[in-house]
Image: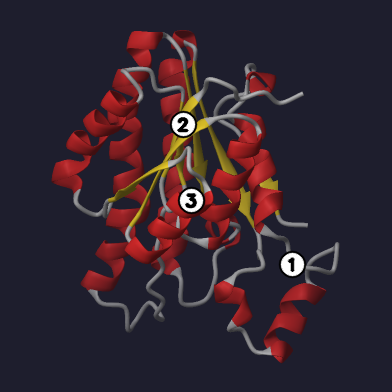
Amino acid sequence: MINLEKRNIFVTGATGGIGGSIIETLNQYGANIIASGTNEEKLNTIKSKYKNIKTINFNISNHKKIDSLVEEVSDSFNGKIDGLINNAGVNNDNLSLRMSLDEWQKVIDINLTSTFLLSKFFIKKMLKNKYGKIVNITSIVGHTGNIGQSNYAASKSGIVGMTKSLAIEYAKKNITLNCVSPGFIQSRMTDNIIESVKAVLTSRIPMARLGNGEDVANSVAFLSSDQASYITGETIHVNG
């Protein structure tokens, strides 16, 4: 059985669809959670729904303050951080010939650079406790590519390579790093896809349906638990 009781876990991107499912599932398994996001209204909703979850309004694109964020989280957990879920991310789609440097850089900075910096600073804390589990949320697009998403695909595939490298560096320190790669997941984003396009996407999925946030969250919970103690540098594909 997955058991996350007394595990202190920080989750980014908690106000999104997948993020919401992740904190709900981790909470069900008994984890102590601090959730971050940038939508104050949704953060307040989380606080109302889960009296035991602390929230932080923080934009992870602010790289110079990530170390301060980590200190705040560490202090809230009395210096003991067991898990980090790097879920926050953005897309800014455009065909490559039309993509501006700003469109490219924004996605790389938030999805890849912020994930690296958060991992780096949290690993420093985990080393002191000789324990830690980091789960990075990637995407099927990082493995297959997609029209108009060269920046997004690069950022997500970059996370996989980075995760493998960090996993090797800290394997002997009892710190594991893994990825969960969602396919097409039912969300506000997919709700906006016209039915004809959604039908084409679904036809390419062997299970002939979109996934849901809980499908992703279950894999995150597993990799955050001691059930996955001998797994590191790997990617679980949740794509049907």
Task: Indicate the position of residue 185 as horizontal and vertical percent values.
Answer: 65, 64
Circle 1 crowding by C-alpha within 10 Å: few under 14, some 14–19, many from 20: some
Q: Mark 2 or 3 closer to N-term?
A: 2
Q: Earlier in the sequence, mark 3 or mark 1?
A: 3
Q: Nearer the viewer, mark 3 or mark 1?
A: 1
**What is the crowding at mark 2: few (fewer than 14 residues within 10 Å), some, or many (at least 20)?**
many
Q: In the image, is residue 203 above or below residue 6? A: below
Q: Indicate the quadrant containing the N terminus: top left, top right, bottom left or bottom right.
A: top right
Can residue 163 be seen from the camera position used here?
yes
Which structural element holds mark 2?
strand
Residue sticking out furthest to the right: 207
- Pointer 2 or 1: first along the chain: 2
Check disc 1 and give the amino acid type: Leu
Q: Secondary structure at mark 1?
A: loop
Q: Position of residue 78 (x, y in %)?
A: 32, 19
Residue beneath disc 1: 210
Q: Decide: marks 2, 3 in contact (CB < 8 A)? A: no
Q: What's the distance in space between the residues labelled 3 and 1, CA to CA? A: 22 Å
Check disc 2 and report the residue beneath it. 9
- How packed mark 3 is, by other alpha carbons closer than 10 Å (few <14, some 14-19, many 20 or more), is many
Residue occupying image coordinates x 19% and y 51%:
62
Question: Residue 35 sits in which quadrant?
Answer: top left
Q: Which residue is mark 3?
A: 157
Q: Where is residue 105, by image quadrant?
A: bottom left
The mark found on residue 202 in the picture is: none
Residue sitting at 43 percent across and 50 percent down?
47
